[in-house]
Image (cartoon, rainbow, N blue to C red):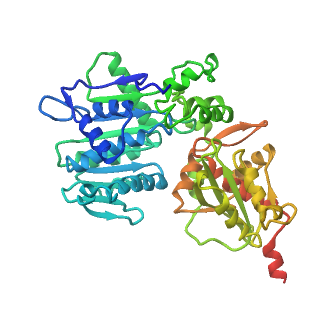
Amino acid sequence: MIGSQTPRIQIEPDRSGTDGEGAALLMSEYGVKLDEWQKLVLDSILGTDSEGNYVTTSAGLSVPRQNGKNVVAEARVFFEMIINGGRVLWTSHQVRTSKKAFRRLSNMFTDRRHPEITQTVKRIRQQIGEESIELENGGLVEFTARSRQAARGFDGISLVIYDEAQELTDEQAEALMSVLSASATGTRQSFFLGTPPYIGCTGEVFRRFRQNCIVSAGKGENTKNSWHEWSIAAEDLKDMDLSDRRLWYESNPALGTRLTEEFTEAEYKTLDMQGFARERLGYWAKPATAENVLAIDPALWDSCASEEPRPEGKTAYAVQFVPDGSEVVLAGAVISTTGKARIALIDIQPTGRGLSWLAEWLNARYKEACVVVIDGKNGSDVLIEKLRPSGGGAWAYKDSIYKPKGQDIITAANMLINDLNEKAVTWYIKQEELRESAITAIKRPIYGGWGFGGQTSAPIQACSLALWGCRTSKRNPQRRMLIG
């Protein structure tokens, strides 16, 4: 049994033919066999009129995570560069997501088993922030994380990929659309791919595009836009049995192949109802008003940005495992002798890398830090064991490792907000990923209070716990070093 290969919502412009078959064949010859649902989406995106021109101006794809939507985008880009010699801009919400996309495509163009592909490469640029692949035929793909100046330096673009489209803002979209309008090529296409917006993420562009496609289809209009969506439909989730495996298969085309029932069941037992419905079943909830749910005022957060170097002083670290167990976040906090604090996002890594690297990093800093706060159900106990002397770790002081309780998380969140208001804490201005986490985090109700919530809240949650640990821990190795 495999997931449905047909989307619940399928909106496509009329077409006479398609280059989708050619794109799928190109990928299969390279060793990547596309699923039927991926071919279906490609056929639509690369649909042509009687003169061979692409009929789709903008395409949208909404499918739960880990089903393979990025493979569709890679197939589209691969074909555009090799066959059409087109210029592509691949944009992502986060720097690390953009880097992942670059690595995947650069691996395809440097695979020595396929000299017919490697010989087409003119130049691969790997400089951080300027990653690109250029072919001898003029084909080009450039990668960038979206920002307020996301469109600078790009021209002649025929295709824009909006990865993580649920995070795309109107400001970013307006800047990037100017790149397409300046294109000298005959084909101009936008491809939005993502998941339903989470609470606190307005998802304004992605949501509006989806709604426009649905309204136009309802009126019987034949537009130039397409939309493919794997999801469940529900007015109220309380009326649905989310444990029903039929819903799992209907909304996940890769279930039974790349995804397993066991993994999905683990998500069902770990995530809350809204999170599971959104992340695994593609559920589009009604939009929330950001002003009512945001935990940190973006203007307040930006007012505490600093270009000053990290101060010396009492130090603490925090580790946050994300709810679905896919990633682990490492953050730190320092309190200077003046009492002013600095918080920082240190690293984010997939848990598939293991935890030995993190344990080694923390064990090497035991003599520098007063405490490490470790939160999250997935992986925390394993990491704690690796830090304790009984497991070969260095954290021997009684309260140097701490698992926060619900009230601690509430206190940490409120402490950070208070410090921001009193200008008693700063963050390094170039940490864009931390900024995005802070200004999109929502108030998540817990134990009569609130903590940070939202899809990308782990970095700010970790920073708040590091700050809380630093301010409340009675241990201070730095002070002992000064006395000695």
Closer-to-camera residue (76/389): 389
On the picture, is 443 further left or further right than 60?
right
Q: Between residues 95 and 73, which one lies in front from this camera angle?
A: 73
Residue 420, horizontal then vertical, whole percent: 66, 55
Can residue 177 be seen at all in this image of the molecule? no
Q: Is residue 394 visible?
A: yes
The picture quadrant where one finds residue 344 is bottom right
Name the residue located 51 percent from the left edge and 29 percent from the top edge: 282
Q: Position of residue 281 (x, y in %)?
A: 54, 28
Place of residue 76 in the rendered image (x, y in percent of width and height, measured from the top left): 30, 42
Q: Nearer the viewer, residue 416 or 403?
A: 403
Residue 208 or residue 319, whichever sits in front: 319
Q: Residue at x 74, y 37 (%)?
A: 446
User: What residue is at 54 percent from the left and 50 percent from the top?
Assistant: 436
Q: Residue at x 35, y 46 (%)?
A: 31
Residue 66 higher or lower than 119, as above or below: above
Specify whether 112 is left or right of 170. left
How many numbered circles are shown?
0
Q: Is residue 32 above or below residue 17?
A: below
Question: Extreme front residue here?
Answer: 113
Quadrant of the image for the C terminus?
Answer: bottom right
- Rendered position, 78 above or below 347: above
Residue extending furthest right? 398
Q: Residue furthest left?
A: 51
Q: Left or right: where does residue 142 sit relative to residue 308?
A: left
Which residue is outermost to the bottom? 484
Q: Is residue 339 above or below residue 291?
A: below
Task: Give the percent coordinates (x, y) of residue 166.
Answer: 46, 39
